[in-house]
Image (cartoon, rainbow, N blue to C red):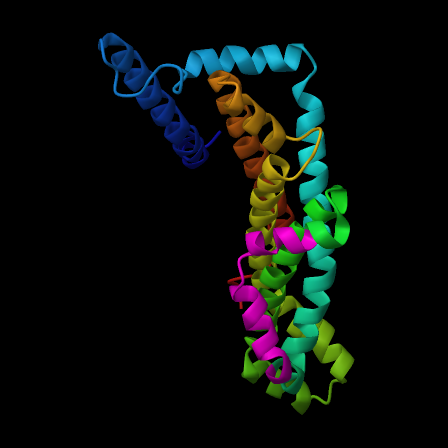
Amino acid sequence: MDPKSLRNYIYIIGGPIVIILVWWIFSAVNTMFEDPLISPLFLADPFAVLQTTISLFRADTIETDIFNTLRRVLAGFLLGAVIGVPLGIIIGYFRRIGDALEFIIDFFRSLPAAALFPFFIMVFGVGEFSKIGVAAFSSSLIILVNTTYGVRGVKELRLMAARLFKLSNAKIFYAIILPESFPHIFAGLRIAISYSMILVIFTEMFIGTETGLGKRIIESQEVYRTAEMFAAIILAGILGYIINKALLFVERRMITWEGKA
């Protein structure tokens, strides 16, 4: 391993180690006081959280929650991408359509997705689609806006050169517009999948469901199983981190020309 890669790995693991160390020191010092700043009932130490996490995996109870949360996140994200990318390309390419829909897009983009929870419950009930639908709605708007700006941000000089060589509109689209808009599209995808994760966890906490990390977080909080609550929160964060890294890996494999022209 070269020194640069080693430094990168140190930076990556350094942050979590520092956070865990500060957490452990604060927990240890906090319990020394007769009247602690935060009750140990509400602040589990990191080693207790680690033991609880291991116990949850050994008992085969957490895997189902992780799987169902992941399934909902990906379903909402993919549905949002299927809606957002094509619409963003159309709106970005045909400016008159974009101008006509500008108010509607900005209105819904400015509307907090959480405010639509009651609407989705009324229309779709408390089943799976209400949870997936909220995530898909928010994801689609983020992806749509980023895709639109990506298409509109294509360098005019390249378009002029393409027209000079009398390339067809289809060739211009596939050879110039779509590749140049990829960085913006993937930026939108990465933001959207994070929002999808947030909304799915939130809906699992407050909309009826039997499984999911959000459900485990809220149930653990209600009965003061603090270590289990922290374990579920950390697992949700790790799951989101892995999803983002996977998407970044795909982006780097697909966009190999960025910064070279």
197 or 10: nearer the viewer? 197
Which quadrant of the structure image shows residue 214?
A: top right
Span colored in magenta = 99-120
46 or 134: nearer the viewer? 134
130 or 82: nearer the viewer? 130
Q: Above or below — where is 196 with respect to 46?
A: below
Residue drawn at (63%, 79%) of the image:
101
Magenta stretch secondary structure, dominant: helix
Percent across and percent down for residue 153 are 54, 75
Q: Above or below — where is 30 with respect to 118?
A: above
Number of numbered discs overlaid on the protein picture: 0
Relative to 123, is 162 on the left or the right?
left
| Residue 111 included in the magenta stretch of the image | yes
Which quadrant of the structure image shows residue 208?
A: top right
Percent across and percent down for residue 29 are 25, 13
| Residue 106 included in the magenta stretch of the image | yes
Percent across and percent down for residue 193 are 61, 48
Which quadrant of the structure image shows residue 185?
A: bottom right
Residue 254 appearing in the image: no
Q: Above or below — where is 190 with respect to 222?
A: below
Percent across and percent down for residue 115 are 56, 55
Residue drawn at (59%, 43%) of the image:
197
Relative to 53, is 86 on the left or the right?
right
Residue drawn at (61%, 88%) of the image:
160
Q: Above or below — where is 221 with respect to 123?
A: above
